[in-house]
Amino acid sequence: MTTSEKSVLIDDLHALEREALAKLATVPDERGLEEWRVEVLGRRGTLAELLRGLATLSPEARPAAGAAGNRVKGALEAAYAERQRGLRAQSRARELEAERIDVTLPGRGVHLGQLHPITQLRREVERVFIRLGFSVVDGPEVEYDRYNFTLLNMPPDHPARDIQDTFYVANVGAPSRAPATAAAAAAGAVSPGDGAAPAGTDPLPPSERGAGGHVPVGVDGGKAKMATPAGGEVLLRTQTSPMQIRVMECQKPPIRVLIPGRVYRNEATDAAHESQFSQVEGLCVDERTTMGDLRGCLTFMIRTLFGSEREVRFRCGYFPFVEPGAEFDMSCHVCGGQGCRTCKGTGWIEIGGCGMVHPIVLENVGLDPSRYSGWAFGFGFERMALIRYGVDDIRLFYGNDLRFLQQLR
Amino acid sequence: MRVSLKWLRDYLDVTQPAEEIARRLTMAGIEVDGIHHLGGSWDNVWVARIQGIDRHPNADRLSLVTADYSADGRERTRRVVTGATNIKVGDVVPLGLVGARYRDGHTDPPQERVLQPSTMRGIVSEGMVMSGFELGLSEDHSGILVLPADTPVGIPLAEALGDTVLELDLKGRADCLSMIGVAREVGALLNQKVRLPTVNPQPARERCPDEPLTIEIADRDLCARYTGVLVRNVHVGPSPAWMQERLQAAGLRPINNVVDVTNFVMLEWGQPLHAFDYETLLGSAAGEGQIVVRRARPGERLLTLASERPELELTQEHLVIADGERPVALAGVIGGADTEVRDTTTAVLIESANFLPVSVRRTARAFLARPTEASRRFERGIPPEHTMPAALRAAQLMVELAGAEMVGPPVDAYPEPRARPVIRLAPRELERLLGVSYDSATIEGVFDRLGFTYEKPQGGSSGEDYIVHPPVWRLDVERAADLVEEVARIDGYDKIPATLMRGEPPVPLPNGAMLWEEAVRDLLAANGFADILTYTLTSRERLARFPHTDGRNAAGKLAAFVDDRVAPPVEPVTLANPASQDEDVLRTSAIPSLLECLGANLRHADRDVHLMELSRIYLRRDQGLPEERRVFTAGTGAFRSSGADWKRQENDFYYVKDVLEAVLERLGITGHGYVPVQHPGFHPYQAAAVVLNHRPEAAGKKPILPEEVLGVIGQVEEEVRRAFGIGQRCFLIAMDFDRLIEHATTRRQYQPLPRTPAVLEDLSFILKEDVPAERLDSSIRRAGAPLVESVALTDTYRGDRLPEGTRSLTYTVVYRAPDHTLTNEEVTAVRGKIVQAAERQTGARLRG
Ligand SMILES: [Zn+2]
C-alpha cells in the first residue's frame, strides 16, 4: 500500500461525500430519503463499500484514512438527520394544510335550553330570602274561602272581597269518572303483552320513600296534612296570602317563610292583566320583629335585584290582613329617581303590598298579638318581570313563544 | 270618588297645587288615581243658549239646533246638527266649534278627537252641542250636558265649569267617600282646620195633627238609626249653578233641586239620603202616616226608580222602608217609583238613615248590576251619628234653594246608640310594631290633627297608655294597631327605618318537592329544553284533544294506568263563574297545553322546539280540596340542530328516552323499565309506560301494579298531533312528578375506584326482532356476574347478511375482578356462560 493508495481512498471518500450530499439535496420525500440512506449509509451502501477498502491499507495509512472515513460518515449521517427533519416538517405541513377549515362558518347550532323568565325571577327572589333565613314552601291553588278571605280578616260580605274578582269552584267533592273508562278505573294489576297474569303484590321498597329529607310538610300543596275545618266555599286563591294562615297554623314562631305560587283573578285579560299570574308572599312572625325589618328585607331584595342604589319607599296602603299597611315602591332603576316614562315621571315604581300582620289574623291562628308581631308582603312576578325587562304585554309570559323566551335567557 | 278642588275649598283653604295634594294623599294611603283638569282642554267650547230646534230635512233622528253664544253685544249664532233628544229651546249647553277637542265614545277605548268641519246628511254642521262624556266630565253618554239656566251665555265653558278633580281610589277609608271626609284628611295632612257648613235650620212651625210622622224600626238588627224630616211648600225646579257644577264635577247628573240636594248632602257628608213625596205615603189601617223599617214580606213587590228591572220581587232577605201599607223603598239601595219626588211635589220627607252594611250589600247585589252611589256608601259603613247633621243640612238647603219650610223637628229613631270604641295605646307599641319611637308631641300632634280626643298617660303603673277616642267618622279605627298606622302615616312612613330581624333563627321548613322540580328544570334546561308556564284554566274540549284509552283490552289496562297518572279521565274541577267557556275547568292533564305550545312554536321553527313544564293537574277528591298533583311534561318536534354537515338531525324515541333517563338518574330512581303500551295518544309501536320494579328477565310475566306506573313516553299519534296543529313527528314525556318524588332519593353509594385492569370485549349477537333487547342485556349481566362489570350496547345492525326477522346487537362487555388481573381462561369461561345463557334465555346467537 502506497501513499497514493491511501490518498486515493481519501479522495474517493471525499468524492462520495460530495456526490451523496448533492443527491441528498434532491431527495423529494421520505421514501427517496430512505432509498438514499440504504444506498449511501446502508450496510451494503456505497460508504460501507469504500470503508471496507480500509482493511487493505497499510497500517501506516489506516489512521488517516480511518479518520477521514469517520468524518465523512458523521457528516453524511448528520446531513441525513437534518434532511429527515426537513422532510417530516414538510409532510406534516401538508397534512395540516389538508385539515384547513373555514373558521368563519357558524357552529352547527348547539340548541340551548332555558328557564322561563318568571322561573328565573322567582329563583332570584327565593335566593334573596333564603339568605335572610327564610324557607320556601308552596301550597294549594284551589283553596277554601276561609283561608283566602275569612281568616285573613275578610269575613263574608267584607267589601274588600270586591277588590279581587274571585273564581269559585262549582263541583267540590266526589269525583265521577267518565263511563267509557270505568273498566280501566276498576282494573287491578295488568300484565303487558300477552299474559293476563294474576294481580300480584310487589310493594315498593319502603326504604326508598321520601328519602333525603324531601318529605313534603303539611303546607305542601294538595298533600296538606293539617286539619282543614269545613272551610266554606272552594275557590281559586286570589292571592298567596292564604298560605300565611296555613303556615302559622302548623308552625310556631319564629316563622320566616317565602311562598311563591299561582293565583287567579276573574278579570278581563289585556296587556296588563291576566286571569292567572304568579305571586310571592313573604311572612315573618316573631316576638320582636318590626315594620323596620320588613323595610330592611324588602330593601335588601330590591337592591339585589335592581342594583345597590335602589331605595324602597313605603306608602300607606289598605289591605284587610295587615295593620299598619303599606304599598312599597322602589326608586326607578331606569332614571335613578329623576322621573322617566317607566316611572311615569314620579321616580318611583310600584312593586307590591305589605304591612304588619293584622292582630285579628294573629288571633285567628291562636297567636297573642300583644306578644307576637309579624309582617308580610306580596307582589306579582309578572309585573316585576315587565318592569325589569321592559316587556309591554303580560300575556307574552304565558304564550311561551320561544322567540320571546329566548330573548330573556 | 271624584273630588272637585273648587268644592273642597268650601271647607279648606287649599293653596297647594293639585299634584302636591294628590301626592300627600297618596302617601297617606288615599290613592289618587288621576288628576283631571276640567276645562284645560276646552278651547273653542262656549256656553250657548238654544234658540231654535228644527227637524233635519233628510234624517228623522237628527235635528238642527241654532245655538246662540253672543256676548259683549256681538251677535254670534251657529247652526249645528245633533242626534240628541234631551234638549229644548232655552237650554244652556256647551257649544264646541271647529278645533274643539272631545272624547269620542264610539270607539273602545274612547279616543280624543278634534272637531272638524262636517256635513251631515247634506246640512253643514257648524259645531257640536256636547255631552258630559265628550267633555270628559262624566261617563254619561246619554245626552247633551244641560248647564244651569243661570250660567252666563257667551263665555268660554272653561270659565263656567273649569275645575280640577282628583279621582280617588278608595280601598279602605270609607270616610273619604265624602267631601267633608276628604277635607278632614287633607286638613290633617296640611295641618289646617276644616270649616264645616253651619247646619241649624229651625222649623217654620210644628207638625199639625193631620201631618203625622212616626218612624218605627221593626228590624233593629238591620237598621241602627232612622232620621226623618218633613219639609213643605217645596217648589221643585232646577238647582242653582254652583250646586249643579259641584254635582257634575263629582260625576252626578243634576235632576231637580230636591234630588240634587239629597245627592249634594250625600257627597258632602257621605250620608245617603232619600226624598219621598210625603203626600204619596199611605197611612196604615188605623189612618196614621208612618214609616216602618222592616224586612219585606214574602210576595211583596216594589216598583223602583231603576229602569233595568222595574218590579222587584222581595223576600225576607230584603230590608225595606214601608209606609202604612207597602214597601216604598229598598233600604239603602234605591227608592220606589210610587213615592218619588215629581215636579208637582210640594211636601218632602227626607230620609237620613243608617243601615247594616251587609244587608245593603246583599240586597244591592241581588237586584242591581252595579251598586248605587248610596249602596256603595252603606256597604262600606257610615257612622250613625251622621244621620242628624245630614238630615238637617238637607232640610236647610231645601229651605234655601226650593223655598221650602221645615215642619217640626226631625223625627229620630235611634233605639240603641252605638258604643264608641275607647282605645288604649302604649307609646312603646309604636316602637314594637314600627321599629322607631315617637315622642309624645308627635303622637299628640297627629291625634289633634285627625280629630282624635285622648287622655294623656298619667304615669305610674296603670297610666302608661293613651286613652284614645276616635272621631265618629273613623269607623275604621278600632284598636291600637290602627292608631299606630295613623301616627306613622301622618308623621310619614319615611321615618320607618330599614333594619333586619334580631331574633333567634326559625326552624327551616323542608320543601323537597320544589327542590326536585328545580333540579329537573335545571337538568332539562342544560339539555336544550325551554321551561314553559301554561294556563291552569282550560276547557273540556281542549282537554279531550289528547285522547284517553278506552281501557278495554289487556294492553288498554296499562294505558289506563298511564292515564290515571298523567291525564285521569275524571270530571274536572269546574268553575261556577268562568270568565269564558274556553276557560271553565281546571286542567286534569298538562299534555294538551304542552302540545298546543309545541304546535305554536313549530309554526315559526322547523327544529329545536324542545319544551318542558313542571306544573300541576287538579283532581277532585271524595272530600275536601282537590288533589293538586305535580306533573312533569316535556316534548320535542322531529328535529334538532347540530347534525352532520350543518344539517338538522332527527329526534327519535331514543333521544327523548335519554332525556328521561337523565331525569330519573338525577332523582336517584333505579329499577324502572319501559313497557310497550298501546295508547290512542301515541304511536302504537313507539310508546312505553315507565314502570317501577321492572324485571326484564320476567319476560313480561310479572304483573304491573297501578302504583308502579310513573308515566309515559313516546311518539305522539299522528291524528292527535295534527289536532294540535303539529305537522311533524313529535315526542312526548308525561310523568306523575309527585310519584317520582316519592321514589326519589339524594342518597348515593360510593364505590372505590378499581385497582385492577379490566378486559374489554365486543360481543355481537343475532337476536330475533320480537325479543326485547333488554332481555339479552339482562341475560349477559346475570350470566356474567360477578366478573362482568358493565354491558353497553355499542352497535346495532340490520340487513341482508342476517337471517330475516333478526338483528345484530353488539355489546361492549367489561370484565374485571376486584382483586386480581383476569386471565384469558377466566374471561373465556365467563364468555362461554354468557353465550350459553343468552342463547337459552333469548334465542340469541353469537355472531361470527
Ligand atoms: Zn324613571
Image: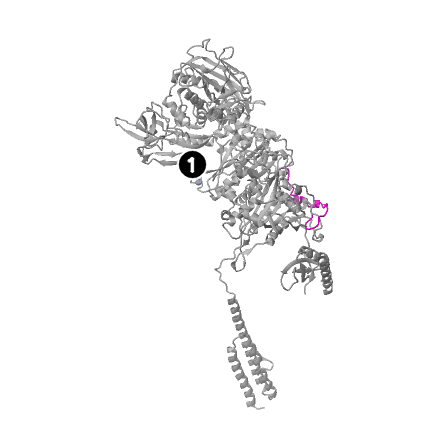
Q: Is residue B504 left or right of residue B166?
A: right
* Residue A216 included in the magenta stretch of the image: yes
Q: Dividing the image into 4 quarters, which one contains the N terminus of chain B? A: top left
Q: Dividing the image into 4 quarters, which one contains the C terminus of chain B? A: bottom right
Question: Relative to B24, is B607 above or below?
Answer: below
Question: Relative to B564, is B400 above or below?
Answer: above
The local crowd at label 1, few if under 14, some if 14 to 19, many if 20 or more residues have their Cα within 10 Å, is few
The boundaries of the magenta stretch are A191-220
Q: Is residue B581 or residue B30 the one in the foreground?
A: B581
Q: Residue B839 location, x and y as percent? A: 72, 60
Q: Residue B190 location, x and y as percent? A: 43, 27
Question: Relative to A87, is A190 above or below?
Answer: above
Residue depicted at 56% across the width and 77% down the height:
A34
Q: Residue B465 location, x and y as percent? A: 55, 24
Tag 1's secondary structure? loop
Question: Relative to B696, is A313 above or below?
Answer: above
Q: Which residue is mark 1?
A: B109
**Furthest residue in direction left, as rendered:** B73
Q: How many marks?
A: 1
**Furthest residue in direction bottom, as rendered:** A2
Q: Chain of mark 1?
A: B
Q: Residue A219 location, x and y as percent? A: 62, 37
Q: Is residue A125 or residue A224 the one in the foreground?
A: A224
Q: Is mark 1 within 8 Å of ligand 1?
A: no
Specify the amino acid type for callout 1: Pro
